[in-house]
Amino acid sequence: MGIFSTILGVWGFGVGASIGVVIGYYMFIYFQPSDVKDPVVRPLVELDTKGLQSLLPEIPLWVKNPDYDRVDWLNRFIEKMWPFLDKAICKTARSIAKPIIAEQIPKYKIDSVEFETLTLGSLPPTFSGMKVYTTDDKELIMEPLVKWAGNPNITIAVKAFGLKATVQVVDLQVFACPRITLKPLVPTFPCFAKVYVSLMEKPHVDFGLKLLGADAMAIPGLYRFVQELIKDQVAKMYLWPKALEIPILDPTKAMIRPVGILHVKILRAIKLKRKDFVGSSDPYVKFKLTEDKLPSKKTTVKHNHLNPEWNEEFNMAVKDPESQALELTVYDWEQIGNHDKMGMNVIPLKELTPEEPKVMTLDLKKNMDPNDVQNEKSRGQIVVEVLYKPFKDDEIPVDVQDSNELEKAPEGTPASGGLLVVIIHEAQDVEGKHHTNPYVRLLFRGEEKKTKHVKKNRDPRWEEEFQFMLEEPPTNDRLHLEVVSASSRMGILHPKETLGYVDIYLSDVVSNKRINEKYNLIDSKNGRIQIELQWRTSS
């Protein structure tokens, strides 16, 4: 009876399964659901912003923001170098952590804390884009977007009271946007003295934590608590404007300091060639040391003279007498337009004997190209007296101050606000149709300020400072600057004309604290203006 029931059961299962398969196949083939429609295919250009973000949630920054650059080459470089970078970084981390751990563990009565395993895994971080700021200061500012979903294996062994516990960090994810500033830039390899690293926003940190082999993050509430704790602690230490300072070179040794003084006395010029068709020339001498960014020095203008005498003395700081040279250029002053170049020459400082004054008569040349045949033409001579006096050991300046250090706001500044400082340095290649007597008109929050007028000059220099006390940071404000030319006479037809303007958004100034840049003037052919902006706070 048992065998018979078993045979019937197997037979029934086989028949039922066969009938079910046949019925299912028949229904699949002949019964199509009526609510299924063909997908609608649309070009990407027809989608709105939300539609694109739903399809492409990870749009790179260099697509969304034109001021971010692609750095695929850097990602490929890191990918190839990652096995070696992994070992180097881990070795450095061990050496840095060892003295810190040795200093801290006695406070908690712990016998030892050691890395049993330390590796960053096989997956390198990637850079989604990088923004580089251009300033006129001796610094380089970069803002990369770093994403790292790695597979590190970090195991730490803690021994205390005769017991041993192991903590393992796995599945680490870090998304951060750091600001890396290299400054000051110096002429000594690696060409920057310090690295400043700060975070522009709180980083995203996610990881797994195993304690004694068990997943500690599975404890209710611990995962969220640890994440927020790490974000807050990192933000307290490194969120902008706070920064991690990494010294690379000693600034006092890296910066080229003055090693002596060059005394220059411009005596006279002889037999200068007339540049004007009518009358004589109005010569003056403009000179500077090569490899020096300081403004050139000038003599007075001697009107209507081809054999002028100046007898004017100047002092100049020398940083490298072996490579620097004194460059002298004679110009013919013009009331309107550019000043005509009459000739030039140079004096290499290595040809001077220290502590010995030397009177030199130099032939003026068109340029310093030895192959230029036009240098054979007579342009007159210039007579100068030079004396190089090197510093003694006790005279060499040892204090090197950071020229980029920002002053604090004065007392009485609102705690939540600050002082906005606008320094208008100079403009270049500004020219009006009827007159060129430029001044700058500044508009900010309905308040108007003006610089002085510079008469008949296409390259005016103002060096004027304006200040605005604000109750809150001007993150959403803009500054309007307009270069205007006013007639020097009582002009009726053309009393004023605009030479160009620029609008500067101040959000970057609040973030960077200081910006010194040259801006192209709108509605001007080649005009540019150099503006320095500072955001000073009381903290």
Image (cartoon, rainbow, N blue to C red):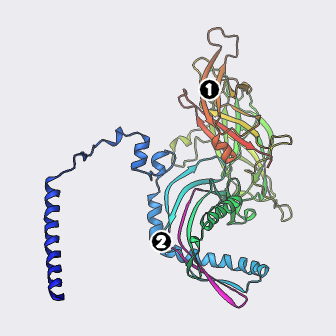
**Whole-percent x and y of residue 159?**
68, 86
**Whole-percent x and y of residue 49?**
43, 41
Residue 177 lies in the magenta-colored region: yes
**Whole-percent x and y of residue 471?**
76, 37
Which comes before the other along the chain, label 2 or label 1?
2
Q: Amino acid at mark 2?
A: Met
* Nearer to us: label 2 or label 1: 2
- In the picture as drawn, the residue positioned furthest to the front comes out as 1
Name above or below for residue 529 compared with residue 139: above
- In the picture as drawn, the residue positioned furthest to the bottom comes out as 162
**Residue 488, located in which quarter of the rendered image?**
top right
- Return the mark for residue 351: none
Give the residue pinned by disc 1: 337
Query: 28 or 419: which is nearer to us?
Result: 28
Magenta highlight range: 150-178
- Return the mark for residue 81: 2
Query: 92 or 328: which is nearer to us?
Result: 92
